[in-house]
Image (cartoon, rainbow, N blue to C red):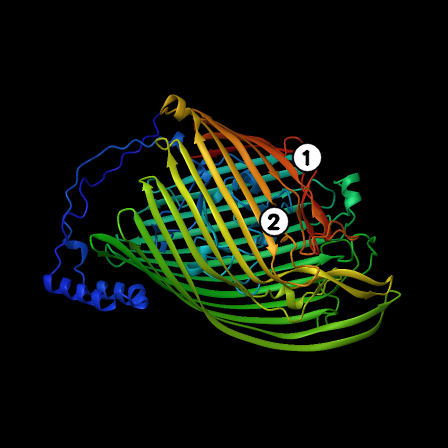
Amino acid sequence: MSDSIIYILPSRFYQKIHHRLHRLTQIKKKIRENLCNPWFILFLFPLFTFAQTTPPDSLEISLETVEIHDQGTASFDIRRLRNVEGTAIYAGRKSEVIELKHVVANLATNNARQVYKGIAGLNIWENDGGGLQLAIGARGLDPNRTSNFNTRQNGYDISADALGYPESYYTPPTQALKRIEIVRGAASLQYGPQFGGLLNFVFKKGPEKKAFEFVTENTAGSWGLLSSFNSIGGSKKGWNYYAFVQRKQGNGWRPNSRFHQNTAYASLEKSFGEKLRIGLQYTHMDYLAQQAGGLMDFEFSQNARQSKRTRNWFQVNWNLAALNLDYQISDRTRLNNRAFVLAAEREALGELGPINRPDPLRERDLIQGIYRNFGNETRLIHRYEIGGQITTFLIGARYYQGHTDSRQGAANDGADPDFEFLNPLDLERSSYSFPSRNVAVFAENLFNLSKRWSITPGIRWEYIRTASEGYFKSQVISGGQVIFEQKIEDAKENARHFALLGLGTGFKLTPKLEIYGNFSQNYRSINFSDLAVVNPNLVVDSLLKDERGFNADLGIRGKLFKGAIQLDASLFYLQYMDRIGVGEIVIPDPAVVERAVAFRTNIGDARIIGLETYVEANVWKMLKGKRENISLSIFANASLLRGTYLTGGTAIKGNEVELIPPFSLKTGVNFRWKDFRLAYQTGFVATHYSDATNAEFVVNATRGMIPSYSVQDLSANYTIGQFALHAGINNLLDARYFTRRAAAYPGPGIIPADGRSWYLGVRWGI
């Protein structure tokens, strides 16, 4: 059957706009008077024209039917965001969209190697084989729980605390997603000042032409993996609904790494005519995971599957609710309002002592985080005309209020997941409350200077207030006993406000090929965890300060050879001032007098430069022309990166920036014949450092080199009527490698990546 789609398009656009002559004269006069005033251009001019221009009802457009045949088999996995989508402007920014319907991968475990194979420059940490948490970083930014991205779901925040603890313990199941949107550091003006940019998970909706649809997808795999994903959805009389539940469990590749996870989501949306749409969404996720702990270097070489910790556990409970209102004021003006609430908590239980010492079987350490957040974001987007070119203005405001309680103390000395403090009224480590508040206003204007050239200036003003109140205890231990203890009360408040500026531009060489560039300032607050957690493997500088810097990109993207080749190649420059990193400090130790431990502080200023490229070619289309039932494409995703510390102590200045593989490559083949799909990929990541001292080896394995590695994956799908079969092998050649060294959970020490695994599943829907 053909996958062709018929679109109805206008044969002529914008024939003639009937402006009143005296109003047009007023607009031209205002332009002449304020031509050199950038504030007028960015803010006042769009508002003035909004008030002065005639509503677009006066547009006269004659229509005729044109058939365009879009071959679904020729679709690429990756595309970029359009210049304007919804109530956002993406012109001149480096952006990628992963269309999940085209991805052939182990979606039951959210396999990040496969799902994000087309995103250049990503550093992916592989913490667990179940896909419980996503850990990706870009351009030398820490991948830990994706904390350097502004992580969102359907446009609203999902991390623990967007200001002081932007770590994402919840990752939406890819089986429920329509697409994943990624915008690099230049997203700071619209989505918050983080260096990494935006990561937005967009869920599926109920089918528009069916009142009811049911889909069940069940997968089994290595080491006891069982996953069941079940969804319903549909549309009727202006209502649209979609809901799913997922249950996932497994024993893990290593001993002491079993887990189970439950995720549920419900969305209900009502359309009131063509102009107003209101939607309500709710998400719940919980999981319990045993953590096998880390390994030392020689232990990893001897047997990467061994485990030295049997009493470490991690528990998460996540609840999100959101209300979305979308109002089409006119054909040119649209308003969007999102309100969201988070009620969540996470608990880590176990032995945090150095991995080069055996578990002393003493009372375990329990760290508890409770998060209660509320936010609202409102956007107004308006299109108007200058000199025959459509121009787009965006203005928005955000209010965010968070409250985090962080507690750390002793728990029992057993092996079960018993998340209870022994002395909840007088904790042995620390107890803190972190209230926070954020107000932001942002504006951008997309100017189409011609049919080929556009520029987009923007500004964001931020007010951030963070505070802390609580206590921590300082202890001296000898012979396993506390011989001295001091309780230190602590209360701080830090309010700051600042403006971020940015500019993007794009120039079309051809209708399908564009040169783009952008510059955007960035800002990142210190984390609450840097202030409250006591870790024997890590000392945190009490004088930490926020990080500042900017991102700049220059690239070329688009399609060649009649759409058979898609490419995006760009150079970037990231300036990072007061970068927070890990150095080294010597502290007293009762067992060995003194020892060197990691020291987290503002290491210095860093410069990171790189080349990020992605190319995908539909070989079958190039050789044979368009074919509806068959396609063969190859892709290559490569990055060359270099980061250097420009300032810092004598042990830091001139060093390579940590967490930056100097070279990485992913390449593979995608094949489709009728309803059968096959995907093979191989990836290589070069050797790189895990900390700013560029240590190659330390005794407790929390710092050191991350050796180069290569890993391959093979997946296939086959659809038969209402059924679909999927199967594959991850880590095809059973490589032994690791992607991270942890200072705390899930370590400390080397965290081995999973060996070879298989999966097999079936999907059925009505």
Q: Residue at x 36, y 43 (%)?
A: 514
Horizontal side of residue 743 vs 440, given as left or right: right
Return the residue nearer the eye: 691 or 641.
Answer: 641
Which label sits on residue 735? Answer: 1
Horizontal side of residue 606 vs 566, given as left or right: right
| Pointer 2 local density, CA inside 10 Å: few below 14, some 14–19, many at least 20 | many
Identified by mark 2, the residue type is Ile
701 versus 9 height, above or below:
below
Q: Is residue 275 visible?
A: no
Q: CA distance from mark 1 to mark 2?
A: 21 Å
Q: Quadrant of residue 439?
A: bottom left
| Pointer 1 local density, CA inside 10 Å: few below 14, some 14–19, many at least 20 | some
Horizontal side of residue 540 vs 142, given as left or right: right
Q: Quadrant of residue 539?
A: bottom right
Residue 57 place in picture, x, y as percent: 16, 54
User: Which residue ends up furthest to the right in the rendered image?
Assistant: 479
590 versus 259 height, above or below:
below
Q: Which residue is mark 2?
A: 660
Return the residue nearer the eye: 25 or 2.
Answer: 25
